[in-house]
Image: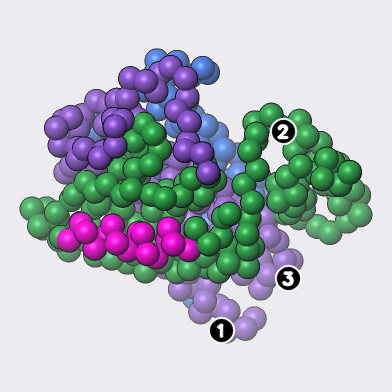
Chain colours: A green, B purple, C blue
Amino acid sequence: MIRRLFPHPWLSLTLVVTWMLLVNKVALGSLVFAAILATLVPLLTASYWPKQTRLKSPVRLAAYILLVIGDIVRANIAVAQIILFYRKDRIRSAWITVPIELTSPEAVAMLSGTITLTPGTLVADMSGCGRVLLIHCLHAPDPDAVRDEIKTRYEARLKRIFA
Amino acid sequence: MEPAFEIVVTALLVIAGTFGLIGSFGLLRLTDAMQRLHAPTKATTVGVGAALIASVIDLYLYRSELTWQELLVAVFLFITAPITALFLAKIHLHQTVPRDLLPPTGTGRDWATFDQTANGPTPELPKD
Amino acid sequence: MIGYALTYALGCFGIALACNLWRVLRGPTIADRILALDTMVINMIALIVLYGIRQGGPLNFEAALLFAMTGFVSTVAYAKFLLRGNIIE
């Protein structure tokens, strides 16, 4: 019964939190309205989410987000140095391909978002079958190291988060 | 007024301004079209993020209201920035990047921007 | 002290907007122009937030959120149009 009323519990929770943030105060009325939204929206959009992706461990997901935020700040400083101080002919950009083992669309989207947000790398395309990512690096003297870092640092963690 | 918080807000504002400027400066300075994509999509996001955190702390300091609305803007920007970058990169692949510069996929199919079968039925992700 | 930092940040984002405008006018390809416009939107959001701090009120939040949303949607719509010649498929 509860499963049928809330086919996507995490989506419902996200909707409640987003609505409370929008209202910006804690009141019973807005909580009730948030609950109504959290029931209606997943039911109405259920046809767009045909497959369930199970979230194995929310704690790991939170840790992952913190890790990514740290990486964003660290890598931003690196890119700022490249922009400001490198001569133009010393910036060595490269295309690299990263074969991925993740299969669920949510996990792949999360991985590409991470890659694009950590500066210096950018997901440009995906192979037609969805198993290889095309990544552009701003400055990569050693492209294999970048590929290894993506695979070990981000993909391995995401594999443990999403079932 | 806690002086420690004041220093934090000042530092955040300086970081925000600096990174925002560096991101837009990179847009001017870098020569290659794909390189230009790197600078603004990220440096600016961090700049706006720092400005938003500074705004939260500042409102709490001076008006002692705790607002979390600003977090929504930051989350929205962080979610949409990769999507914008992906679309612009696809336009570059489509229009400016020479086809033979790209590495091969290593699978049977071409990159999705050029893949002819992608115009037909949507390519299925591998079954698990 | 916050006042000086605020002026500095406002100045930085103002110069950033000028840089973006130059790229919009010059930009060799159309993708460069879209990218510059998108960056302008993000910089404008930062300016709105900083102006809110200077005014000392949370009134500007809605403006920032609306800017972020319209900016994102218009960028994606334009990109989609260039890629497929069609926005709603």
Residue in the foreground of this view, choosing between B103 and A79: B103
Query: Does the image show residue C21?
Result: no
Q: CA distance from mark 3 to mark 2?
A: 41 Å
Q: Residues within 10 Å of mark 3 (few under 14, many from 20)?
A: few
Q: Residue furthest front?
A: B128
Judging by the rendered image, the residue that carries numbered circle 3 is B64
Q: CA distance from mark 2 to mark 1?
A: 48 Å
Question: Which amino acid is tagged 3?
Answer: Ser
Looking at the rendering, the stretch of residues picked out in magenta corresponds to A142-157
Mark 3 or mark 1, which is nearer the start of the sequence?
1
Query: Does the image show residue B83?
Result: yes
Question: Which amino acid is tagged 1?
Answer: Ala
Q: Residue at x 14, y 55 (%)?
A: A91
Let me know if marks 1 and 3 both belong to one chain. Answer: yes
Let me know if marks 2 and 1 both belong to one chain. Answer: no
Q: Residue at x 49, y 58 (%)?
A: A159
Residue under mark 3: which chain is it in?
Answer: B
Judging by the rendered image, the residue that carries numbered circle 1 is B4
Residue under mark 1: which chain is it in?
Answer: B
Judge depth for marks 3 and 2 and give the one in front. Answer: 2
Question: Which amino acid is tagged 2?
Answer: Ala
Residue in the foreground of this view, choosing between B93 and C75: B93
Q: Position of residue A102 (x, y in %)?
A: 46, 49
Residue in the foreground of this view, choosing between B44 and A117: A117
Q: Residues within 10 Å of mark 2 (few under 14, many from 20)?
A: some
Q: Position of residue B32 (x, y in %)?
A: 18, 42
For residue A122, above or below residue A158? above
Judging by the rendered image, the residue that carries numbered circle 2 is A46
Residue under mark 2: which chain is it in?
Answer: A
Per the image, is A40 magenta? Answer: no
Q: Residue furthest left?
A: A89
Where disc 2 sits, the SS reads helix
